[in-house]
Amino acid sequence: MPIDPARTQYYRRARFTTRLPTHYLYARSHFWLLQVEPGLWRVGLTHFATRMLGDFVECEFQIPEGDSVKIGQTIGWVEGFKAVADIFCVAEGDFAGFNTELNKKPELVDKDAYDRGWLFMVRGTPDKTCVDCAGYVALLDQAVDRILSQTGEGHGESQSGEEEPPNEGDGGPWEKKGKC
C-alpha cells in the first residue's frame, strides 16, 4: 500500500524512527489494529515491536479459526532474530484467521509492517484501552525513554509531524509481555 502522507505521522525519538498510520488503533503491547470492515480487525506488530524482535523469522497461532478469543489471551508466538514472544489478543470476539502469506514471505513483517505484514484478524471489539495515533506517540516516548535510561543514554526528544520520512533507527530490548 502506498504511504498516504495525509494519513501518516512520522515519529523520531533518539535513534528510533518510524511512520504511524493515523487511522489505526494501537495497543500498549505494540500491536496495531485496523478495522477492515465493520467489526473485523486486522492486527499486526508495530515497527517498534519489529525492531525489538529483530529480523522476523516465523510465527505460529495456537487457536483455530472461529474460536472465541479474549483480550490478553495468548493465541500464538512470534520469533525474531533477537527474541521469541507470545502473541496476545488485543480484541475480544472470534479469531478470524492469520496471514498465510507470512509462511512464504516472513520478511513482510519487517518490510511492510502496517500493510501486508499483518499477523491475524479478529471479528469483535478491540480492548477499550487501545489508543489512537497521538496516544501511541506518548507510549512510544515512554518506551524509548525507558530504554535510554537503562542504557545510560539519557532521554531523547520527541519529534513528530508531517515532514519528510525519517531513516529507520536502532531499537532496544522489547518488553514482550503485555496487554493492550
Image (spheres, rainbow, N blue to C red):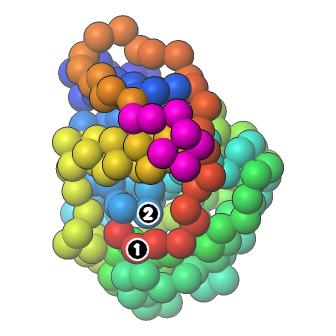
Looking at the image, residue 11 lies above or below residue 65: above
Expressed as whole percent of the image width and height from the top left, the position of residue 65 reads: 55, 81
CA distance separating discs 2 and 1: 5 Å
Of helix, strand and loop, which one carries label 2?
loop
Magenta stretch encompasses residue 178: no
Q: Are marks 2 and 1 in contact (CB under 8 Å)?
A: yes
Query: Who is closer to the viewer here, 28 or 21?
Result: 28
Task: Give the labeled residue for mark 1.
Answer: 179
Circle 2: residue type: Ser
Expressed as whole percent of the image width and height from the top left, the position of residue 152 reads: 55, 39
Task: Give the labeled residue for mark 2.
Answer: 29
Quarter of the image with the N terminus in it: top left
Of helix, strand and loop, which one carries label 1?
loop
Which stretch appears magenta? Answer: 149-155
Whether residue 24 is visible: no
Quarter of the image with the C terminus in it: bottom left
Q: Is residue 95 left or right of residue 172?
A: left
